[in-house]
Image (tube, helix red, strand yellow):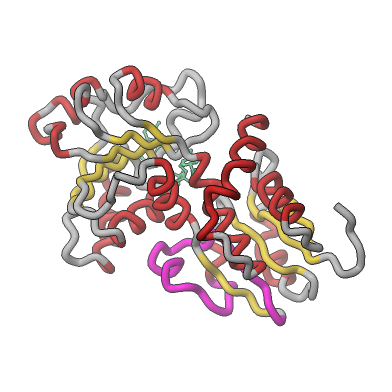
Amino acid sequence: MKVNGHTGILGVLGCPVKHTLSPAIHDLLIEKFNLNFIYIPLEVSRNNFEKFIKGISRIDNFAGFNITVPYKNDVMKHLDEISKEAKLINAVNTVKIQNNKMYGYNTDDFGFIKSIELNYPKFKTAGKKVLMLGAGGASKAVAFALLKNKISKLIILNRTYKNGIKLRNALKMNFKHSDIIVEKLNFNYLNNARGSTQFHDLIINTTSIGLKKDDKILLDLKYLKGHNTLVYDLIYNPTKTGLLKKASAYGLPVLNGLDMLILQALKSFNIWTGIELENKLLKYIMPLRTKLRKML
Ligand code: NAP
């Protein structure tokens, strides 16, 4: 990579960003398309966030940035325009800077849905009954993507019941007629009558539980044995969380969050550069998977 006076700057803004894989993804894309860009980590503490965000669009060669925890929502009030999806999800993960104006987007919903389509092309989201563990930041984009794609039912299981209700209320504002229910997270949910297993086509872990080796498993999957429920964990490091290991042991199809991470990045790259990748997602995803798997 050769930096010169014409180099456009891209980056990922968050705190912390030391473990981010985004520079590795965008480095490879920049190299592949032979573009004069550089993608850098932008670690900005809470105290400096306002000053940083107010100044960044004044740098003429700053082309855009991704936003990660904890600023996906805070960034919104500083933007000149926000896409419809990002407004509905109430979070921005991609900002494009053009003529000193900042435009916000959310590409997580795209990443999530496309990751299922690419890995399980026969799994059609429409009409499916979905059980989602968690009601935090990532859950919003996932739930939005699923409801937009017309699932028939969403069951949210969350440790803090009122956070689940808050998410349900936010979703209901835009998906008035959707069937969304909230239950308190309970390991035995699938074993009791209300959670009767035959109704779940997809189970997604959107909590942060599973990141650590000794994390507990949040849901007993035993009763899914013999079913075809797809078990998806947004976590990609470890590549197989305790939940996914159990699911595999019961013969269930599984998916981790690596492709979602890559696909949301491909969409961000498209927003910044205008380069169309959607028709060739598999072509671009392959080398990125190989590169990132070596880093995990
Ligand atoms: P977040 O906003 O902090 O939400 C955390 C969620 O986990 C909440 O629902 C929280 O429940 C639940 N939780 C936390 N500790 C728990 C515990 N001990 N027992 C049960 N539930 C617990 O986090 P986030 O930003 O949504 O991220 C969640 C995960 O998704 C992270 O692991 C992140 O790496 C992953 N992620 C992956 C991608 C991808 O591209 N693959 C994208 C985004 C996020 P309460 O409401 O009770 O606190």
- Describe residue 20's horizontal placement relative to residue 194 as left or right: right
Q: Residue 209's quadrant in the figure? A: top left
Q: Residue 9's quadrant in the figure? A: bottom right
Q: Residue 131's quadrant in the figure? A: top left
- Describe residue 268's horizontal placement relative to residue 35 as left or right: left
Measured from the top left, where is residue 91 in percent x and y? 47, 61
Q: Is residue 134 above or below residue 171?
A: above
For residue 207, say whether it is visible: yes
| Residue at (45, 35) in percent of width and height | 256
| Residue at (28, 50) in percent of width and height | 124
Task: Identify the magenta region.
Answer: 77-99
Front in this rendered view, residue 186 or 126: 126
- Kindly give the residue lying farthest to the right in the view shown: 4
Front in this rendered view, residue 76 or 146: 146
| Residue at (68, 56) in percent of width and height | 47
Measured from the top left, where is residue 249 in percent x and y? 33, 17
